[in-house]
Image (spheres, rainbow, N blue to C red):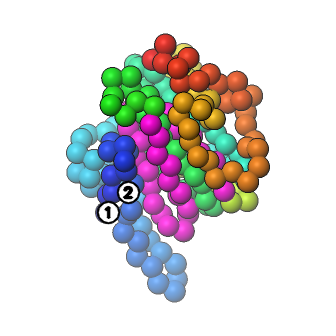
Amino acid sequence: MRVTPTHLKEVLLIEPPVFGDERGFFLESYNERRFEEAIGRTVRFVQDNHSRSARGVLRGLHFQREPSAQAKLIRVVSGEIFDVAVDIRRSSSTFGQWVGIRLAAESHRQLWIPEGFGHGFLTLSDSAEVLYKASSYYAPADEGAIAWNDPDIGIVWPLEEKPLLSAKDAAAPSLRETALFL
C-alpha cells in the first residue's frame, strides 16, 4: 500500500496494490492491520456508506461535531469525483485550508480524512458511486455543513456549470458562521 500525505498532512492519499490480468483485477480495498500501520493509529469503522450521484452533483461540505465526529475512508467504485477535505479544527494551523483530489474507479485510489475535517465531492463523470467507511455513526443532532463556495475557503472546484445541490447544501453557512458552533 502506498500512502502519500497531502498538504494537509493528516489527509492521506492511499493507493492499494492492484493485481490485474486479462481476466480483470483484484485488490484488497481494506485491511485493518495495514491501514492502521499506514496512518499510525487505531481506527474502528462502524458504518459503510454508498452514494450514487449524477454528473455535476456536489455533495457537501459535511461534517459531524463531537462527540460524533467522523473519520472517513473514501473510494470510488464507478465513475470519477473531485473529493475535498477542509480543516475545520479551530486550533489547527491549517484551519480553513482545503485539499482536493480526483478519485476514479480506474485508479483505485482512496482518501483518508480524519475527524475534524469537512468533506464534500463533485461528480465529474456521467455518474459516480462512492463508498466510504465512517468511524462514528451518523448523528443528526451533531450534523453540520459549510457552504461549498465559501470565499474564505476558496475551493477551486473543476466546474463546467453550476453544480446540482441539495436544499440543505445550498443553504449551508460559511465556515466563519459554522466555527461559532464547532
Say above or below: 40 vs 28: above
Q: What's the amino acid at mark 1? A: Arg
At 39% from the left edge and 54% from the top edge, which residue is drawn?
13
Numbered label attached to residue 14: 2
Q: Residue at x 69, y 51 (%)?
A: 159
Residue at mark 1: 2
CB under 8 Å between callouts 2 and 1?
Answer: yes
State left or right for residue 24 relative to residue 15: right
Secondary structure of the residue carrying tag 1 is strand
Q: Residue 69 in the image: state x and y as whole percent.
A: 42, 26
Residues 119 and 9: in front is 9
Please count the marks in the image. 2
> Quadrant where the C terminus lies?
top left
Q: Which residues are magenta?
A: 97-124
At horizontal 47% and vertical 84% (from top left) the residue drawn is 21
Q: Nearer the viewer, residue 33 or 56?
A: 56
Q: Position of residue 65 (x, y in %)?
A: 46, 21
Q: Is residue 159 magenta?
A: no
Vertical comparison of 158 with 116: above or below: below
**Magenta residues, dominant SS class:** strand
Residue 54 visible somewhere in the drawing: no
